[in-house]
Image (cartoon, helix red, strand yellow):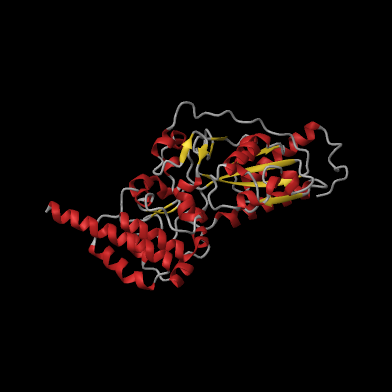
Amino acid sequence: MKKETHPTEGLSERKLTELVEQIRLWGQELGFQQLGITDTNLQAAENKLHDWLENNHHGDMEYMARHGLKRSRPAELIPGTRRIISARMDYLPHQAREAVRLLKMDKNAYISRYALGRDYHKLLRTRLQKLSMRIQSSIEGFNFRVFTDSAPVLEKALAEKAGIGWIGKHSNLINREAGSWFFLGEIYTDLPLPVDTVTEEHCGSCQTCLDICPTRAIIAPYQVDARLCISYLTIEYKGSIDERLRPLLGNRIYGCDDCQLCCPWNRFAKITKETDFQPRHGLDEAGLLTLFNWTEAEFMTNLEGSPIRRIGYQSWQRNIAVALGNAAYDTKILSALESRIKSSSELVAEHIAWAIEQQKRKLSLSELKA
């Protein structure tokens, strides 16, 4: 970005305010439910990030520390940045209303609601790019960079400062009118736009998310230890899942929504109108055995364009093996596990062996009761 005097420096506050209102209208036309604007001061968030990293709560996500202060200092990531336009897009699909029921169906797979459809990154990035081009065509000297979870950006902290919502005790962003089922994206710009007011925090004394977290990953209000988080374990983590945690995963094979499902504010969540976010390949209620029996080629083909594909076939098999071990005893499950163990990688075979042991133990218990 250019460092010389910005062409808009002479614009009046009224003109800039009018421009912001126009930007919000364009955002709505492009499918965003809300836009907010903030400056680049993230000192409070930087302090929290530092403590989180110091306590190793990021687990194996070394990329969280890799870029130093660029994550919490936007102008160091993109020189010249003065404002960030934060955008919110709802993603809750119609079928997600039955998510709680699905968690009790131990032979079906639970996949985080955000990953049931197409990968959101491309859609949001394209819409943000279109919005930026509209702004650029209307005002001289508008320089920008678009981000959608694609760079060292503290998107939740930026969205909070931009008035989109507040960061709840589960560390997700919450909006009073829309809950927390939404994606975020950002436009970094040197345009000196007026900033929005920070939203007040409204969690109050509620700590349902802390109480309901299966692995107690929310170790304190506003503090999440990723090493215990099911989303981290099933998506980011590539190693052997701690045996003490495996039973707690239940049928969750990709991500975990429990802290959102229990949040009182999500009674206000809006159903998305985006077709790309609707479930594909029956992933909203797919059987564990069906998914476990996919070959790697089928995994790659069936999940083309899905965010799930990025975890790779090995993690996919590992996660499903754990879920099968957690399911009630079934001869078909035991047979499928035993038929796959010899052809699997060492990591997957370890989890399959554990699952076989769990299935046999349940069989023994049922025989004793009989």
Residue 365 seen in the current view: yes
Would residue 35 be visible to someone looking at this image? no
User: At which x and y percent is residue 147?
Assistant: 66, 51
The residue positioned 71% from the left and 49% from the top of the image is: 132
At a point 50% along the width and 53% down the height, the residue shown is 277
Q: Answer left or right for 290 relative to 254.
A: left
- Lateral position of residue 330 relative to residue 207, left or right: left
Residue 170: x and y in percent read 49, 38
Is residue 63 positioned above or below 292 on the image? above
Q: Position of residue 175 (x, y in %)?
A: 54, 35
The percent coordinates of residue 258 (x first, y second) are 42, 43
Q: Is residue 314 above or below residue 254?
A: below
Q: How many marks?
A: 0
In this view of the protein, which residue sits in the foreground, 261 or 317? 317
Extreme residue in the left direction: 370
Q: Residue at x 68, y 47 (%)?
A: 68
Name the quadrant of the C terminus. Answer: bottom left
26 to 164, vertically: above or below: below
Left or right of 185, for residue 219? left
Residue pictured at 61% horizontal, 53% vertical: 63
Location of residue 295 with respect to 263 vertically, above or below: below
In this rendering, would 339 be left or right of 49?
left
